[in-house]
Structure formats: structure tokens, C-alpha cells
Image (tube, rainbow, N blue to C red):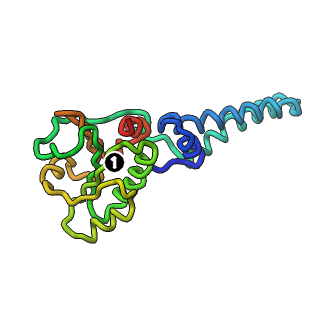
């Protein structure tokens, strides 16, 4: 997940994914507010005062939103509850599985997110399942992840293809005999907070 430098600042200090996404908007709005207070002392004409207020309150947050927009699933947990497939019982309880295919740019981006999740929660069990038989494809993904993340070839491709509906990467998290599934588009800050627990 691509985060702004300001959001990463908050993430690195231990704030949740959701809070780290919201805080930059609040900080920039408050900075604009305080600049308004300072500037309004020097602006005497009523029209210019209103222009200054609107400009300083809206432009910092507006520019930030233009660079780092809020997407549909950023503040929604759109997980799909599933009955855990019997042929995937080897996956750890509460383990996170990221299913990828070779040559997929979104799958490569998911590796960065996996590294961040593991950095923030070293106890998290993460497996990357590659739907490929080639050793080179496995090596390509292994080179992108922390050594504690297992990268394996899929042994039951049909199960993963059935679950994915042709959309990659997708994420699975086990919870006993049930589990959760997210497509790449559905992984926002709220989902990352849930995965990280």
C-alpha cells in the first residue's frame, strides 16, 4: 500500500494504519487554521480575509488529497467471510496468506506491504503462495520479501483460483474453520490493522 511520507512518519512511530492515514489531513487542516489566525491580523479588507481563510483552510488538505486520495475501501473492512478450505488446513491459525501470480505489478506491491506488516508485528505469520511452477518466479518473489516470510509454490492451484475469481493478489487470513478473503482493491488501512493483529 502506497503511503505518503507524512503517513509513514506516523506509522513509524507506532500509530495504526487507519490513524496514520487520517492524521495528515488533520495536521494540514490545523496548520492552515493557525496560519489563518496569524494572517488575519494583517489583512483588513473583508473580502481578502474570506479569500485568505478559504485558501489556507482548504488548499493544504486539498493538495494532499490530490496527491494521496482516499479510496473507496480505505475506511471500510470489506472482508468476505469464507469457510476455510479443507485442502488449506496446513496454513497457520491466524496466519496471513498472500496469493500472487508471476509478472503482476500489484503482486509485487503486495510484497512491500507484507514486509511492512512483518516489521510492525514480528510475530505475524505470513506466507506468499505463488501460482507458478518456475523456480525463477519463486526466486523473484523471495528477493522482494523479508527472509521470515515463506514464499512457496501453490500445491492446490485450483482452490486458490476458485477463491480468487481471477483477481490477484488476494489475501487470506485463517480463523479456525473460517477465514477472511480480501482482493487487492479491498486492502486499505482498516484491513491492514485487522491483518496486523
Q: In the image, is 159 to the left or to the right of 109?
A: left
Q: What residue do we see at 15% from left, 55% from top?
A: 157
* Rendered residue at 60%/39% (across/down): 24
Q: Residue at x 25, y 36 (%)?
A: 80
Q: Which residue is mark 1?
A: 184
The reply, left or right, for residue 56 in relation to residue 153 is right
Q: For this rendering, which residue is in front, 145 or 8?
A: 145
Q: Is residue 80 left or right of residue 76?
A: left
> How many C-alpha atoms fall within 10 Å of the one at disc 1: few (<14), some, or many (≥20)?
some
Viewer-side residue, 23 vs 89: 89
Q: State the image coordinates of residue 118 (x, y, percent, origin top left).
A: 41, 47
| Rendered location of residue 131, percent (x, y) | 21, 59
Res 193 quadrant in image: top left
The quadrant of the rendering that contains the C terminus is: top left
Which quadrant of the view contains residue 124?
top left
Residue 39 spot, x, y in % from top left: 83, 34
Q: How many marks?
A: 1
Q: Residue at x 20, y 33 (%)?
A: 176
Amino acid at each position: 500500500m502506497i503511503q505518503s511520507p507524512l503517513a509513514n512518519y506516523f506509522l513509524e512511530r507506532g500509530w495504526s494504519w487507519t490513524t496514520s492515514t487520517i492524521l495528515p489531513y488533520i495536521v494540514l487542516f490545523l496548520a492552515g487554521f493557525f496560519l489563518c489566525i496569524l494572517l488575519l491580523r494583517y489583512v483588513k479588507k473583508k473580502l481578502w480575509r474570506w479569500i485568505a481563510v478559504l485558501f489556507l483552510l482548504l488548499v493544504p488538505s486539498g493538495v494532499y488529497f490530490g496527491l494521496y486520495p482516499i479510496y473507496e475501501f480505505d475506511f471500510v473492512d470489506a472482508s468476505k467471510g469464507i469457510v476455510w478450505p479443507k485442502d488449506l488446513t496446513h496454513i497457520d491459525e491466524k496466519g496471513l496468506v498472500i496469493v500472487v501470480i508471476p509478472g503482476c505489478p500489484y503482486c509485487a506491491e503486495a510484497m512491500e506491504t507484507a514486509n511492512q506488516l512483518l516489521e510492525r508485528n514480528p510475530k505475524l505469520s505470513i506466507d506468499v503462495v505463488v501460482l507458478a511452477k518456475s523456480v525463477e518466479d519463486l526466486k523473484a518473489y523471495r528477493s522482494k520479501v523479508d527472509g521470515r516470510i515463506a514464499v512457496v509454490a501453490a500445491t492446490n492451484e485450483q482452490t486458490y483460483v476458485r477463491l480468487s475469481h481471477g483477481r490477484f493478489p488476494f489475501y487470506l487470513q485463517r480463523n479456525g474453520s473460517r477465514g477472511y478473503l480480501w482482493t487487492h482493491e479491498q486492502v486499505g488501512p482498516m484491513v491492514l490493522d485487522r491483518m496486523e493483529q
